Image (cartoon, grey):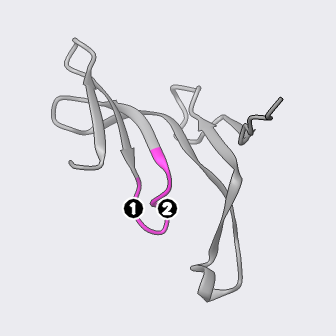
Amino acid sequence: MENEIKIPLGNGLFLVAETSYEPYEKEICVGIRDGANNYVQDLAIIRPAYAYTDDPADGEIAWEQDLFDVLVYSDKDSEDYTHVFEIELYEEVDL
């Protein structure tokens, strides 16, 4: 797949990072896949923060410019993410 980075882990599994598809094309999903290219485990989703809008001109999603979400799947027995981190864009200050 052209929108992914795949790193072999040495035990028949691969660490994979890939972009999502519309309307979430600004997300990167990180997970574990097996040799048959099946997802075994989600690890994280990294994306600009967003909010849903009522304006169809916005595509119903308004992406933030300076705020990012990291959704972490830390419970191996759950399909839902367990932690959400909001990270503001670092802006270097001239001294």
Q: Magenta: predominant secondary structure element?
A: loop
Circle 2 residues within 10 Å: few <14, some 14–19, many ≥20: some
Tally the marks.
Answer: 2
Please state if 31 lies on the left or on the right of 67 as rendered. Answer: left
Q: Which residue is mark 1?
A: 21
Give the residue at the far top of this rendering: 10
Which residue range is magenta in the image?
A: 20-28
**Residue 24 is a magenta residue:** yes
Q: Quadrant of residue 61?
A: bottom right
Picture layout, residue 9 above or below residue 37: above
| Residue occupying image coordinates x 58% and y 26% | 75
Which quarter of the rendering shows the C terminus? top right
Q: Amino acid at mark 2?
A: Tyr
The residue carrying pointer 1 sits among few (fewer than 14), some (14 to 19) or many (20 or more) residues within 10 Å by Cα, namely few
Secondary structure under the numbered disc 1 in the rendered image: loop
User: Vertically, is 59 above or below 85?
Assistant: below
Q: Is residue 67 left or right of residue 39?
A: right
**The quarter of the displayed image where residue 81 is located:** top right
Circle 1/circle 2 CB separation < 8 Å: yes
User: On the image, numbered disc 2 is attached to which residue?
Assistant: 24
Amino acid type at circle 1 is Tyr
Q: Residue visible at 39% across and 62% down?
A: 21
Q: Position of residue 34 (x, y in %)?
A: 24, 29
